[in-house]
Amino acid sequence: MNRRFVPWISLLLLWSLLPMLWQLISSLSTAEALVDGSIPFLKRWTLVHYQELWASDPPFWRYLLNSAVVSGLTTLITLVLAIPAAYGLARLPQQLRQLLRWITAGAALFPYVLLFLALLELARRFSLGNNLIALAMPYAGLAMPLALLLLTSAFEGLPRELEDAARLEGLSLWQRLRWVLVPLLAPATASTAILVFLFAWNEYPIALTWLSRDDLLTLPVAMARIAGSSIYSIPYGAYAAATVLGSIPLLLLVLICQRQIVSGLTNGAIKG
Amino acid sequence: MLHLNGLGKRFGDQWILRDLNLQVREGECVALLGPSGCGKSTALRLIAGLERQDEGSIELDGARLDTIPAERRRIAMVFQSYALFPHLSVRENLNLGLKIRGVAPTQRQQRINSVLDTVRLKEMADRRPQQLSGGQRQRVALARALLRDPRVYLLDEPMSNLDAQLRDELRPELRQLILQGSQPVVYVTHDQQEAMALANRIAVLKGGRIEQIGTPEELYKTPASCFVASFIGRPQINLLNVDQQLTIGIRPEDLHFDVDGMPCRLISREWQGASQLLLLDSPRGALRMLCSGDAALGESLSVSWPTRAEHRFDASSGRRLAG
Amino acid sequence: MTVLLLLPALLLMGLVFVWPMLRYGWLSFHADSVLTGLNPVANGGANWIRLLDDQRFWQDTLQTTRFAGVSVGLEMVLALAIALLLDQRWRGRGVVRALALLPWALPTTMMALGWRWIFNTPYGPLERLAEVVGLGPLNLLSTPASTWLVTVLADVWKTTPFIALLLLAGLQTIPEDLYSAFRLEGGRPNQALMSITLPLLMPYVLIALLFRGAQAFGVFDLIQVLTGGGPAGSTESVALYAYLNAMRFLDFGYSATVMLAGFLLLTLAVLVLAMLLRLGGLIRPVQS
């Protein structure tokens, strides 16, 4: 059974990982090795690109930090708003709930890049530009449909009688959420949190238009800027190193949390 | 004393409950009996405050109950699914309500330990509900209800998820722990045997209305309609149409062998040990008969019944006829 | 009380999704550019008339639709294959699944330059491989046709894992018993695929199509960084065109018009598609 899948599995892995591996190899290759395939194997390697990154201004880890701040804040805001809302949605009468579900699904389909101009105007009018905290607001709004879909179906999955019993025990709404409902929602909350975090981390157009200061850029914007400035110049090694460093946190996140990600997407699929 | 006055509840255009009037005295247990969908669980939820009625009112000890939110009514309900919090241990399940209601920690400990002793679950205190058997979970639910120190007990088919043997074991416990207290108890069930065993009075519901209220004996001996007669008593009563206006009911246990009686053919029999249930084909239709387990059965059987054991109902309305 | 719970979330969503569309509607009937000193001045339907004649816009719409169609089509097929593979039981399945998910986790812009380098002439690995094999200079990023294919490849690489997971979820809802019964009736494995798997998977496939199709239409990150819309605007997407109008040409009125038009066209396409599918019986009407 195992045997006949091996070629396909290998193909899948090659397809998925080769481009990233290539980045890794390039990042460790000397500038000469990058253009000249005939340089002997042992002379091809160097860490200089990583050193350059470390010494650059602003330092590379700054971008990782910015992305982490925005993504973390977005996740927090989204969950704080979405959990009570999902509770409310799960308690609505059937027709209304169905309607809102369609609307939310529609919003989730939406190519959000189209929103950038209006959001940019808002940023300019209220001086929200170049402010990592302010950026979390539109992000939370964009992530809300996804969070609502996942969390509402999670709430619907809880047996109704549990909340009834809690009410009769004397628990008010907030007490019920705090002690009974939200703890029971933990797996769904974790999945939602990770998916929202990934979304915020990878977002580009809004960040591109809201952030211009070098030291405030999030990772995708920083990478694009570096790419724009070095198309034809060969210090590609530095860019490859940036890619590797930029990828590591995400790769770790996905590898560690893959079960939650998968279950979150799975539930989203089944609900959709 | 619990008063339900003209209670009504609608779902869309359909009335699930209509014109429900019921009084439950202190220390009394009234069973709401009926087939699925007859509104009995809804009645319970209205009393608990988990839903709002569309008509009528609820009073407890003279004061309006339905104006108070469910959290503050001090009513305990044992659910069909027990509704134990799966993420908490037994002890924490019992602790949660007490903590929220502001009981002091030492007091909480004391009361929880005491009630755990009462339901004999001391060793299970730190287990999660998933690790308990059905009967044990039910006892935790009971414990939680006891800890509430409620003014009314509501039981929603608490034993329907248990097998017959467990039910037999738990009935006396239930009686001792809850039914013998001074609080009114409303017990919902579809099992008439359970109702007859546990309740002081039974209210038979059909289509959201009470068909008849009375003691088990009253319902058994003088059912007010065909429906009640069919519902109370196992095996089910035999209903025979005499003509356009009359239907008579004979309980299987009132039939006896009589050489001069109606000749019948035996279709099937179920031997139950001390008794046996016979299905007979008679000139007046199929008959169920209960007789002794030792009775010898010949090829042809003749049965009859005493006229005074007959229940007479109007053929069209199903209501009991006087006389 | 329930309404209070819903309000903040719904308000935020309304702000982020509804307000822009309203704003674009208004803005598209105004001239707002450098020429007007960056103040909106009502100009009737001038922007819209301009749009109708705008070759570049319609060309971009065509390109974007073609991109979305081919990309999503390829992703579907590939994702189905991957999902089928991952649905089987073999050791290490979880690890492979996690590894296969990695492309999806990375920001598009980050890999974009990576792709540029991989396809770079003459130094990229692909080019050098071609040399070794004797295929000669490929120059994949210099002609419109091949550049377009590169963008499709990059998009497919990134989003296939996501769709594969969705389809995998769908596969796992199909009861094992159906396949057993089919075998007992004498059916062969590849027949099972056509008779059982695909029909039951249809709802998930359609949802994925819809979802990805809409997203792909809005492609921006990839195009801007990988090709900048070139060569000669052959890979430019509608979103990129709108962006250029706003940020480079500073013509906000027209940018809003482009985006609103794009949104309307997309909505129209989605609705038509949904209606066709429902008529074709592939989507069952929603039961409450």
Image: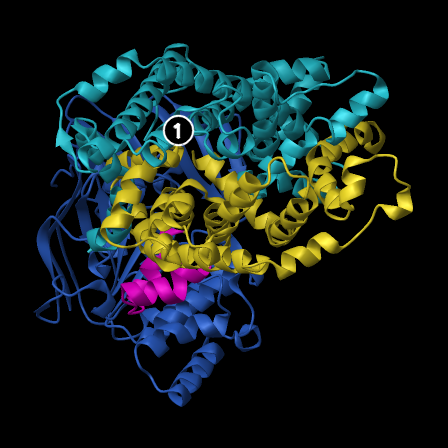
Chain colours: A yellow, B blue, C cyan
Question: Residue at position x 58%, y 43% from top?
Answer: C106
Q: Which residue is more in the foreground, C139 or B170?
A: C139
Three-letter amino acid code at disc 1? Answer: Ala
Residue A261 x %, y %: 55, 46
Question: Residue at position x 64%, y 39% from top?
Answer: A233
Q: Secondary structure at mark 1?
A: helix
The chain carrying label 1 is C
C26 to C195, vertically: above or below:
below
Q: Which residue is more in the foreground, C282 or B245?
A: C282
In the picture, measured across the screen, residue B193 lies left or right of residue C120, that is: left
Q: Is residue A164 magenta?
A: yes
Quadrant in the rendering for residue C50: top left
Which residue carries the number 1 mark? C239
Residue range highlighted in magenta: A159-185
Q: Is residue C234 visible?
A: yes
Q: Which residue is more in the foreground, B130 or C267?
A: C267
Quadrant in the rendering for residue A134: bottom left
Residue B261 x %, y %: 36, 29
Residue B312 x %, y %: 19, 36
